[in-house]
Image (tube, rainbow, N blue to C red):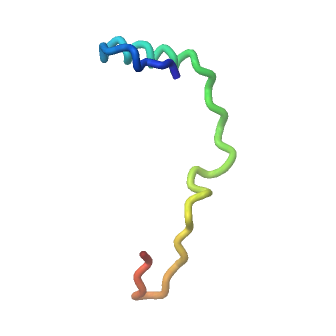
Amino acid sequence: MANTSSITDKIERKKVKRAARKKAAPKAPRTGARGENKAKVKKAARGASKR
């Protein structure tokens, strides 16, 4: 994304960022599920606390 740290006006900064987003190449579709690398919580026995 464009470096907007030098622009102090909020509206102008938004315009520059939006233009940069429009110009950027589209992201590739996901290859795996969004949460595939999250730590999985094992099923606990009834009455036992999970976390």
Count the labels in the image.
0
Residue at image point 52% right, 22% down: 1
Q: What is the quadrant of residue 27 in the picture?
A: top right
Residue at the image point whose x is 43% and y is 18% from the top:
4
* Residue at figure coordinates x 49%, y 82% from the top left: 44
Q: Residue 11: which quarter of the image?
A: top left
Residue 32 to residue 11: above or below? below
In x, y percent, where is residue 33? 62, 52
Asked if 26 appears above or below 46 in the picture, the reply is above
Task: Tell me the quarter of the image containing the C terminus.
Answer: bottom left
Placement of 23 over or under 48, stated as above or below: above
Q: Position of residue 14 (x, y in %)?
A: 38, 18
Residue positioned 31% across, 17% down in the render: 10
**Residue situated furthest right in the rendering:** 31
Is 5 displayed left or right of 24 in the figure?
left
Q: Position of residue 37 (x, y in %)?
A: 61, 57
Q: Position of residue 43 (x, y in %)?
A: 52, 78
